[in-house]
Amino acid sequence: MSIKKQFLKSKPVCKVSFKLTKDQVNNAGKVNVVGDFNQWNETSDELKPLKDGSFSQTLELESGREYQFRYLIDGTTWMNDEEADRYVNSGLGDSHNAVITL
């Protein structure tokens, strides 16, 4: 897993790149990054599959904020990013959401 942040000087946004390897997603066919930045829409922000079997997506998110998110693998399995800035309780049982701070 990797998260890369690129802050833009021209506007108050950060380009955030999310990447998961083939092994991390157990050869999944589809991966979405789902969070409060897309109203937890499970079908938006689908990561693009790469030739090596990994998945990647870059989003422009407003700087100066924190965002909670998780990955949804093949529409059934939720997963957090190991490189998140921190984790918070999701309010749904004992599950947690990853947090990215921009």
Image (cartoon, grey):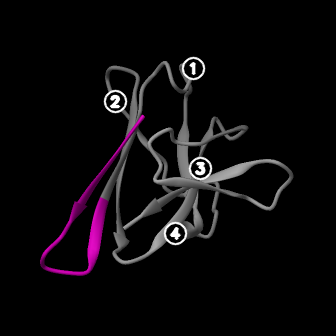
Q: Which mark is residue 78?
A: none
| Callout 2 secondary element | loop
Task: Look at the picture and state if 70 lies above or below 11.
Answer: above
Q: Which mark is residue 70?
A: 3
What residue is disc 1 on?
26
The span picked out in magenta is: 1-15
- Label 4: few (<14), some (14–19) or many (≥20) C-alpha neighbours in 10 Å: some
Closer to the camera, 102 or 52?
102
Residue 82 placed where, x, y %? Answer: 50, 38
Q: Which badge, 3 or 4, is on the more N-terminal residue?
A: 4
Quadrant the C terminus occupies: bottom left
Residue 19 placed where, x, y %? Answer: 38, 38
Task: Look at the picture and state if 53 lies above or below 96.
Answer: above
Q: Residue at x 52, y 69 (%)?
A: 37
| Structural distance between the alpha carbons of marks 1 and 4 | 26 Å
Q: Which mark is residue 37?
A: 4
Residue 18 placed where, x, y %? Answer: 39, 46
Q: Which badge, 3 or 1, is on the more N-terminal residue?
A: 1
| Callout 1 secondary element | loop
| Structural distance between the alpha carbons of marks 3 and 4 | 11 Å
